[in-house]
Image (tube, helix red, strand yellow):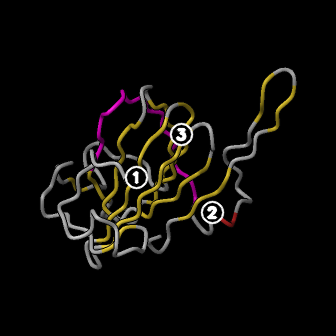
Amino acid sequence: MLDGIRLKPIARLVDDRGFFSEVMRSDWSDIFGEDRIEQINHSYTYPNIIRAWHCHLRGQVDYFLVLAGSIKLCAFDDKTAELTEIVSSHTNPQLVRIPGHYWHGFKVVGLKPALLVYYTTLLYNASAPDEQRRPWNDSTLIPKSINGKQTDERVGKSWDWNIPPHR
């Protein structure tokens, strides 16, 4: 994975009433390090929708947690042309840390909408947003490696969100 991307499995405590999960604790230094959460957002996205690409200009870090559905979450480093691809879903809950200087985004995979909660280390400022955007289908985004592998068939080609990673 790209430097700074971290995953934290989220435990479910199940009983005959349902389940309970802790989804953010300030003492989780293994994922938060020195980051301080400033804002928590909630989003709902329909199947096959792609929300990409953007990066943050002033050091924001994002944390993603899928509550329902499944997403393919990607981060791309313009300097090295490395791409990290993570499939995250409610069936295997995990908190995913993405440093904002990477271009990042996601696509909802599967037949159901995705419900996300995401945390940010900076407050959103509508009059001076901390982000830069490029199109979801930007043909100049060409990975030299995907998840550390140069042998992936998608390497060396414009990134296509719609090509599945499996063969």
Ranked by sequence position, the earlier of labels 3 and 1 is 3
Q: Secondary structure at mark 3?
A: strand
Residue 27 picture location, percent across and down: 74, 59
Q: Which residue is mark 2?
A: 31
Judged left or right of residue 138, residue 79 is: right
Q: For residue 66, which numbered disc appears in the image?
A: 3
Q: What segment carries the magenta color?
A: 36-52
Three-letter code for the amino acid on which mark 1 is drawn: His
Residue 50 among those drawn in magenta: yes
Three-letter code for the amino acid on which mark 3 is drawn: Val
Judged left or right of residue 92, residue 59 is: left
Q: Which residue is mark 1?
A: 166
Residue 149: name its quadrant.
bottom left
Residue 51 picture location, percent across and down: 30, 42
Ranked by sequence position, the earlier of labels 2 and 3 is 2
Q: CA distance from mark 2 to mark 3?
A: 16 Å
Few, some or many C-alpha atoms within 10 Å of disc 2 (few <14, some 14-19, many ≥20)? many
Up-down: is 27 above or below 50?
A: below
Question: In the image shown, does 133 or 114 lie closer to the viewer?
Answer: 114
